[in-house]
Amino acid sequence: MPTRIHWIAASGLLLATFAARGPVAAQEPTNAYTTSIDGVAGGRLFDRHCSRCHGIGGTGGEGGPDLSRGFRRASTDAGLFAVIREGIPDTEMRGIARDQSDQAVWQVVSFLRWLTRGMSVSGDTAAGAAVYARAGCASCHVMAGVGGLDGPDLSDVGSWRSPDELRSDLVDPDESVQPDWWTMRVTHNDGTRVEGRRMGEGTYSVRILDADGRMWSLRKSELTAYERIETSPMPSYGDTLTESELQDLVAYLHGLTRTQ
């Protein structure tokens, strides 16, 4: 019976091997939403749903700890997901609203991971502030109530634009232009030409804010020429700033957050 003996011996060895290894652990789910865009989206969701306790940006609030210092209840992404989704029993930590998708929860996880390790931003913020002034950015952008109104308010831009996005905004501003910042060029049937920021547009009318700060409300039926410009009025700084200056400016802008 040598064959049967060998089979029994092999079976025993196999069972011993599994016993030594212990039970096979279930594989934890992994986060598929880890880009800088996901982190920024997660930060916005966090501010909307979690800031009442943990503060804007997660640095501490009424009844909630400063999450930039780490997490006491979870060490893995899957653990953070579970805490955010379900909350913690017998504590004030409640789960996020049930109408939020799993993707949204994973994006909050990505934001929290960024919060504890920080995004890698090379550059000198003080030098970046000097580049901001020298490049004339304040002529179009307001910061802390000072500056122009032809571009977005940058007072807390680091809270809603990642370093990669900020660099893209500087080098290729036409890549992602929000409709709020489109411009329009029209000619009225009396010959008047108007060009400026598109403040509102409906089926029958359009509102334009011109360079002198005048608001025009015009009926489309009275226009002989009509052009919507969906590119950015902001110039590209890819050729006018050195690589070092770009890094410094991105570092400066990324440091402008709601927590300051």
Image (cartoon, rainbow, N blue to C red):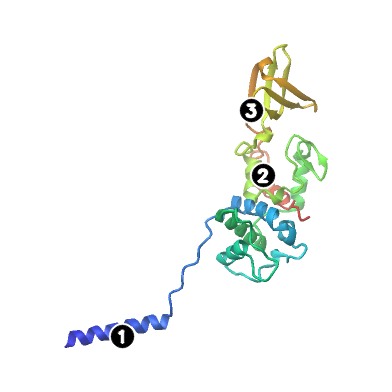
Counting residues from the start of the chain, the first of labels 3 and 2 encountered is 3
> For mark 1, what is the residue?
12
Residue at left offset 69%, top offset 47%: 245
Give the answer, above or below, for where 222 lies relative to 125. Answer: above
Q: On the rendered structure, is 24 left or right of 248?
A: left
Quarter of the figure that contains the C terminus: bottom right
Closer to the chain start, of discs 1 and 2, is 1
Closer-to-camera residue (120/108): 108
Numbered badge on residue 242: 2
Cα distance, mark 3 to mark 2? 29 Å
Secondary structure under the numbered disc 2 in the rendered image: loop
Residue at horizontal 74 percent and vertical 23 percent from the top: 217
Dot 1, how many residues are within 10 Å of its Cα: few (below 14), some (14-19), or many (20+)?
few
Q: Position of residue 69 (x, y in %)?
A: 70, 67
Taking the spot 67% from the left edge, 71% from the top edge, the residue there is 90
Tag 1 near tag 2, CB within 8 Å: no
Q: Amino acid at mark 3?
A: Ile
**Among numbered discs 3 and 1, the one appearing first in the sequence:** 1
Q: Is residue 132 left or right of residue 182?
A: right
The image quadrant where one finds the N terminus is bottom left
Disc 2 marks which amino acid?
Thr
For mark 3, give the secondary structure. strand
- Frontmost of labels 3 and 1 is 1
**Which residue reaches farthest right?**
146
Q: Which x, y percent locates residue 33? A: 55, 55
Q: Which residue is mark 3?
A: 229
